[in-house]
């Protein structure tokens, strides 16, 4: 796990529902940082699918 996140945020969207208020913080990322993070997400998704397939075969 990485250290504390030091992102800056360009926008905060607020959605109000009958039983909740949801705030979505949108980080201000460079294209390179966004691509790096997407690669991390893709790798994690691949691991998840492979583990799921392994368990399905047992």
Image (cartoon, rainbow, N blue to C red):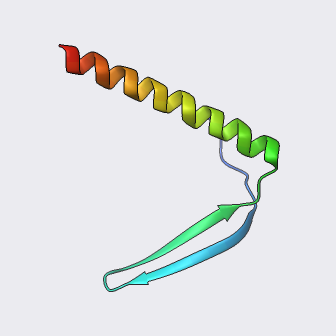
Residue 39, image quadrant: top right
Residue 20: % across, % down: 37, 79
Residue 35: % across, % down: 72, 40
Residue 3, image quadrant: top right
Residue 25: % across, % down: 61, 66
Q: Is residue 1 visible?
A: no
Q: Residue furthest left?
A: 58
Q: Residue at x 34, y 21 (%)?
A: 51
Q: Residue at x 70, y 72 (%)?
A: 11
- Is 44 rendered above or below residue 13? above
Work out which quarter of the rendered image holds the N terminus and state it.
Answer: top right
Residue 13: % across, % down: 59, 76
Q: Residue at x 38, y 27 (%)?
A: 49
3 relative position to 53: left or right: right
Q: Residue furthest top?
A: 58
Work out which quarter of the rendered image holds the C terminus and state it.
Answer: top left
Residue 9, image quadrant: bottom right
18 relative position to 16: left or right: left
Q: Is residue 58 visible?
A: yes
30 relative position to 23: left or right: right
Foreground residue among 3 and 24: 24
């Amino acid at each position: 796990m990485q250290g504390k996140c030091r992102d800056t945020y360009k926008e905060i969207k607020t959605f109000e529902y009958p039983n909740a208020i949801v705030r979505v913080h949108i980080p201000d990322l460079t294209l390179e940082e966004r691509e790096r993070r997407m690669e991390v997400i893709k790798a994690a998704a691949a691991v998840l699918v492979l583990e799921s397939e392994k368990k399905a075969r047992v």
